Amino acid sequence: MARVGFIGFGRMGKALMGGFLAKGLIKKDDVIAYDKDISIMKNAGVSTKYSAFEVVEASDAVFICVKPQDMEDVLEEIRDIAGSRLIVSVAAGVSTGRIEERLHEARVIRVMPNAPALINEMAGAFCLGKRALPEDGAYVGGLLNSVGVAYQVDEGLMDAVTGLSGSGPAYVYYMINSFIEAGKSVGLPDDVALNLTLQTVRGAVNMIIASKRDPVDLIEDVASPGGTTIEGLKALDDGKVDEAIMEAVRCAANRSRELGK
Ligand SMILES: NC(=O)c1ccc[n+]([C@@H]2O[C@H](COP(=O)([O-])OP(=O)(O)OC[C@H]3O[C@@H](n4cnc5c(N)ncnc54)[C@H](OP(=O)(O)O)[C@@H]3O)[C@@H](O)[C@H]2O)c1
């Protein structure tokens, strides 16, 4: 797929393109972008066009990276030029069916990225519309895995992905904030509480990855009977933190389902 277009070149559009370029999966000369915001266009650093229509006309594959509420305008504008091109949408909650209804022949792929895509640490997923070919999935999967991790799933699971990894960074920020506040409440200076928390979270994530062990086994390693950690774990159990996390993911997935209707 030689020429790759971007309609909407804000945070996500730029981040995706940056990752694809950095991994050498696309060439800068083959990128074409359009954003409604003129200041973004002035600093795009790639070839730009004056409309979404022109981007599609000049591209083999097009990433639409606008907010969900701007999708209808974009689809209306590119309806007569999209043809059978590969159209990749990152708009949350917009189904492939809705895009296929507007673009009658396009091969459509829908992506649910998450905020850390902005630093090449995405956890996300994508699904294929009914006209997308397996090789389209392989192509887009290859691109997305250059900015993190992306799984191909059935479209019915996109709401679940939204509930877990789409909304997940906010839950992790929430928990990190609680740890920092807790550290301060037991007497640590602000910067010490912050940096010990961040390194503890990073260390724990890297332990799971490096050891390839189940988190439950790793808990057992550090929770010796009569020790300190087991007391803390009891408090988490008493507070039903596991149930609250289940509920958070379930509520976000349900909301995603509602918004997509
Ligand atoms: N950022 C994230 O963490 C994240 C995570 C998951 C999914 N997403 C999805 O990614 C998509 C983009 O999000 P974002 O954070 O990159 O938003 P953003 O930074 O606001 O970028 C979107 C850009 O699209 C432009 N735009 C709007 N309508 C347009 C049109 N008709 N033609 C061309 N450009 C148009 C906007 O311009 P104006 O500002 O002038 O309207 C804006 O510059 C959203 O659908 C969102 O659901 C984002």
Image (cartoon, rainbow, N blue to C red):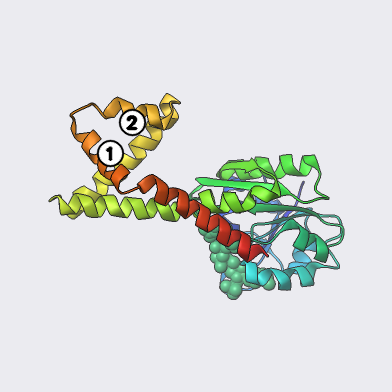
Q: CA distance from mark 2 to mark 1?
A: 9 Å
Taking the spot 45% from the left edge, 26% from the top edge, the residue there is 212
Q: Quadrant of residue 54?
A: bottom right
Report if the CB atoms under discs 2 and 1 are less than 8 Å apart: yes
Taking the spot 21% from the left edge, 37% from the top edge, the residue there is 231
Check residue 184 in the rendering and tell me which mark sits there, or answer none.
Answer: none
Q: Amino acid at mark 1?
A: Leu
Q: Which residue is mark 1?
A: 233
Q: Amino acid at mark 2?
A: Ile
| Residue 18 appears anywhere in the view | no
Taking the spot 44% from the left edge, 31% from the top edge, the residue there is 209
Image location (x, y in percent) of residue 23: 59, 41
Taking the spot 26% from the left edge, 47% from the top edge, the residue there is 195
Q: Earlier in the sequence, mark 2 or mark 1?
A: 2
Residue 233 in the figure: left or right of residue 79: left
Image location (x, y in percent) of residue 11: 54, 61
Check residue 219 in the rendering and tell me which mark sits there, or answer none.
Answer: 2
